[in-house]
Amino acid sequence: MNLQNSQIINESELEILRKKVDELEERERQLLKRLRLHESLHSKILDALPINIFLEDPEGRTIFANEQVCKAHGVYEGDLVGKTVYDFFPKSIAERQREIDLEVWKKRSLQTNEVVIEFQGKKGHMLTGKTIIHLEESRKDYLLGFGLDITDLKNAEEKIAHMAYHDALTGLPNRWFIKSCLKNVKSSSDNNGMMKGVLLLDLDHFKVINDSLGHEAGDQLLQSVARRLREVIRDDTVLARLGGDEFMIFIPQLLSAGETFELSEEIIKGMNEPFYIYGQKFTISPSIGISLHPIHGEDMETLIKNADLAMYHSKEQGRNCYSLFTPLMKEKAVFRMNMLTK
């Protein structure tokens, strides 16, 4: 083979090598492009989620945080990397979070919690979840966590619960509150033998005032009555509006029946003070019925029924007074019912 032929072969081989190098470089460019695309896509997905997503090493240092985390803290991701919960939360909350982290590392399974948070002076609620992931490439374990702000949901739940169990007009607990929260008035310890009391209060001739002045004036009167009743009851006493012009007072601890009499007298005295509605001055009196636990009943429903009978007795006695339930009142009520059904 002569020199010229040898040169032709070498140039041909070089051309083949150049093509292979070009192909490898193009393949590398395409791989890098796909990697960047996948990385960008994954990053976009994580950033688009309205959830805090983060990655921590075993020491609790942040390795990764999505855009939602950065927004919550008002910083860039680079400012979060290497930081721990102690850098962002009050000590008590940070310590609780670290306890949860260590529990996740110990059990190596998904742990979810509803936690109260305080960040930048604001308190809220978060649904958090944490688990451990293993990366084969690095042969290292990391803690993957998420946090969903449920403050608005919690506030909505509290608002709905309040609406369900409170009177819209006066803001007082309603009949459903009494039924759900005071189903069993007998506690396990029975408060060392102390009694409990139920006062049922009805406004005398309220319908006449309501019809003459109008329902809006009647509503204002009910609100004023509620405020005045609040002024005379103890902090541990429950004041509720059962409907219409009927109010109930539940006293959880009584040394004697005399305490209910004293309260009734205070209520009557307070009601004697005039009310002013739409510039008009007038007074309204209450009729009050009283029942005592456990003497007049073991459950709230019975106590309310007996207090209602006692209140009816007060109306019979001329109104603007109070009466303590007696079995005779029930006998009279049964007698009246029998007369009506004959």
Image (cartoon, grey):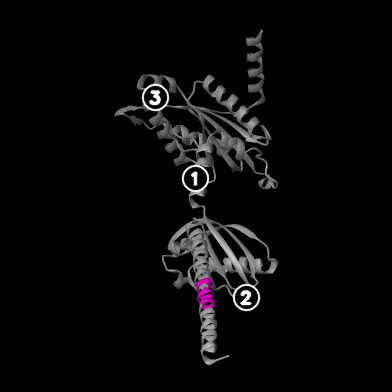
76 or 160, which lies in front? Answer: 76
Q: Which residue is mark 3?
A: 215
Q: Which residue is mark 1?
A: 156
Give the amino acid at mark 2: Ser
Mark 2 or mark 3: which comes first in sequence? 2
Magenta region, main secondary structure: helix
Mark 1 is surrounded, within 10 Å at the Cα level, by few (under 14), some (14 to 19) or many (20 or more) other residues, namely few
Q: Quadrant of residue 76?
A: bottom left
- On screen, residue 329 above or below 112: above
The CA distance from mark 1 to mark 3 is 30 Å
Q: Which mark is residue 12?
A: none
Spot occupied by residue 165 in the image (x, y as percentages of width and height): 54, 38
- On screen, residue 101 above or below 308: below
Query: Is residue 281 toward the left or the right of residue 50 in the image?
Result: left
Mark 3 is surrounded, within 10 Å at the Cα level, by few (under 14), some (14 to 19) or many (20 or more) other residues, namely few
The CA distance from mark 2 to mark 1 is 45 Å
* Element assignment for label 2: loop
* Element assignment for label 3: helix
64 or 314, which lies in front? Answer: 64
Q: Is residue 233 magenta?
A: no
